[in-house]
Image (tube, helix red, strand yellow):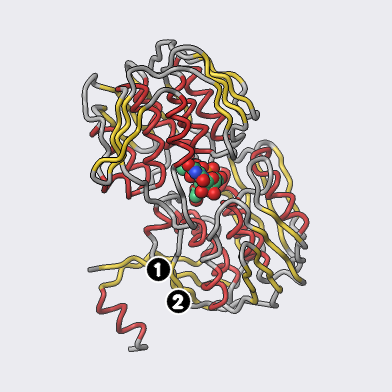
């Protein structure tokens, strides 16, 4: 057995320019939506990630021919295939639940199980199932699997209890195949929803209001595959800005959409970074010591995103003063804090609040990623820390970041991805 680790030698500024990858959280629903289209769908700027490979496997099983060449993915539905998603594929990622709406839309039946993904506390799918029921789907449990069938999907009024991103996407994808109009109230407003609606409209769907709280979908229009470029990844953009803020230096991003990350750039500016935009390039500069940000609360878009919470907490570890971060979206999204403490941070977590008392500096440590963004936060802290950090459990990072080590390398970061055998790792931890 071998294991990859990232070896980061921190404590020096990051300087350079990078291009932001395509958004994982948009590419996955767009790939699922391609199942609804006749003819060929060509998606550009699809990031090369393990979650994207998992989505390709699911599409192939559902009867699509899904091919990837670099960052371009071509999908064509063959007209027949399975309506089941095997347990292993469901467990591979949370986004496997994104296939529920499209499979029902295309085949009127779907069998699946609970999805996997990052452990951020309980991540139920009750709201997905409730919305499908409202559209006429019958749902029962059989031998631990969820069996969904519908004679037809019908458009209806759906009011979400909370603005779930995944449920909004599933409803949109089922509703484009439903009879009549669906009015979705308290919809999520994330840019990825806008990207999905824009893609589907380009295929022939009739969706209005995406990006607002009420989305209206007029079902039944035939959908034909199209060529479409996935939006830039706003959380990857914030990750590299946070690394520049933590380590100091100057990080320039090509392709980021400043409006998508305004809630984050505002916090970074409040912490003392300078952020400018010129000619489509967003640049963060940090020279002096950062200052604490008294209070940050994670909220649905356009407020501060939960996906950036771990990243910003890594930045604030060395900011002068006390910062408080409150996580309101997920129950258990402070699992990265243990690693930051190992690196010398002073953080107290109580329930959904973390109190960060800034320390003058961090030091390298041997740590393991706990989840996708948590792992990225550890890397951000490692670039700020003196000495060497070994970051393990990279499968979490591989789910969401394309060419993570290479990207930091082009910012001048001292980082290597190394492969060790179990024996070598054991010797290392014994100091041999
Ligand atoms: N929820 C329910 N029942 C449901 C669905 C959601 O109670 O049936 C709850 C969740 O447990 C959570 C809240 O609703 O407390 C919001 O979850 P949401 O459904 O909005 O999240 P998601 O669609 O599962 C997406 C992103 C996450 C991101 C969240 C919040 C994708 C593939 N994932 O997840 O991204 O944190 O929205 O913005 O789009 C990541 O990229 O690292 C990541 C975890």
Q: Mark 2 = which residue?
A: 366
Query: Cβ(mark 1) to ligand 1 < 8 Å?
Result: no
Quarter containing the N terminus: bottom left
Instruction: Name the disc covering residue 213, or none.
Output: none
Which quadrant of the view contains residue 86?
Answer: top left
Task: Report helix, strand or loop for mark 2.
Answer: strand
Does residue 9 appear in the picture of this structure?
yes
Residue 109 vertical placement versus 276 (above, below): above
Residue 141 picture location, percent across and down? 30, 40
Q: Sort mark 2 into few (<14), some (14-19) or many (20+) by Cα contacts within 10 Å.
A: some
Do tag 2 and tag 1 residues touch (Cβ < 8 Å)? yes
Residue 289 vertical placement versus 312 (above, below): below
Residue 110 vertical placement versus 312 (above, below): above
Does residue 67 appear in the picture of this structure?
no
Residue 90 picture location, percent across and down? 32, 45
Q: Name the residue rendered at 21%, 22% in the picture.
A: 80
Which quadrant of the view contains residue 423?
Answer: bottom left
Quarter containing the C terminus: bottom left
């Amino acid at each position: 057995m071998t294991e990859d680790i990232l070896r980061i030698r921190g404590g020096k500024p990051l300087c350079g320019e990078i291009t932001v990858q395509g958004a994982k959280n948009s590419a996955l629903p767009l790939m699922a939506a391609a199942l609804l289209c006749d003819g060929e769908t060509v998606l550009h700027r699809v990031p090369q990630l393990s979650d994207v490979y998992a989505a390709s496997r699911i599409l192939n099983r559902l009867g699509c021919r899904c091919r990837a060449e670099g960052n371009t993915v071509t999908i064509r539905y063959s007209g027949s295939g399975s309506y089941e998603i095997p347990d292993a594929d469901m467990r591979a990622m949370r986004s496997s639940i994104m296939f529920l709406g499209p499979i029902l839309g295309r085949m009127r039946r779907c069998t699946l199980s609970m999805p996997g993904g990052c452990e951020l506390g309980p991540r139920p799918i009750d709201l997905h199932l409730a919305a499908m029921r409202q559209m006429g789907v019958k749902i029962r449990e059989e031998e631990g699997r969820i069996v969904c069938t519908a004679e037809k999907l019908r458009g209806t009024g759906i009011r979400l209890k909370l603005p779930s991103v995944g449920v909004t996407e599933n409803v949109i994808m089922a509703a484009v195949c439903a009879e009549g109009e669906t009015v979705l109230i308290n919809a999520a407003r994330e840019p990825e929803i806008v990207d999905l609606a824009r893609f589907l409209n380009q295929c022939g769907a009739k969706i209005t209001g995406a990006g607002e709280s009420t989305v209206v979908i007029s079902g039944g229009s035939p959908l034909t595959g199209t060529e479409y470029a996935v939006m830039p990844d706003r959380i990857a953009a914030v990750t590299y800005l946070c690394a520049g803020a933590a380590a100091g230096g100057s990080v320039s991003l090509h392709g980021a959409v400043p409006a998508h990350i305004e809630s984050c750039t505002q916090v970074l500016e409040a912490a003392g970074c300078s952020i400018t935009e010129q000619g489509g390039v967003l640049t963060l500069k940090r020279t002096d010591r950062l200052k604490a940000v008294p209070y940050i609360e994670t909220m649905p878009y356009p407020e501060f995103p939960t996906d950036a919470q771990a990243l910003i907490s890594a930045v604030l570890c060395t900011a002068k003063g006390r910062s408080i971060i409150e996580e309101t979206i997920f129950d258990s999204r402070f699992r990265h804090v243990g690693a930051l403490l190992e690196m010398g941070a002073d953080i107290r977590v109580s329930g959904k609040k973390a109190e960060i008392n800034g320390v003058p500096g961090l030091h390298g440590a041997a740590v393991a990623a706990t989840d996708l963004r948590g792992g990225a936060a550890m890397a951000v802290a490692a670039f700020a820390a003196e000495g060497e950090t070994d970051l393990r459990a990279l499968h979490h990072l591989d789910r969401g970041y394309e060419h993570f080590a290479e990207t930091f390398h082009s910012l001048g970061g001292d980082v290597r991805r190394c492969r060790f055998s179990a024996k070598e790792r054991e010797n290392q931890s014994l100091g041999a």
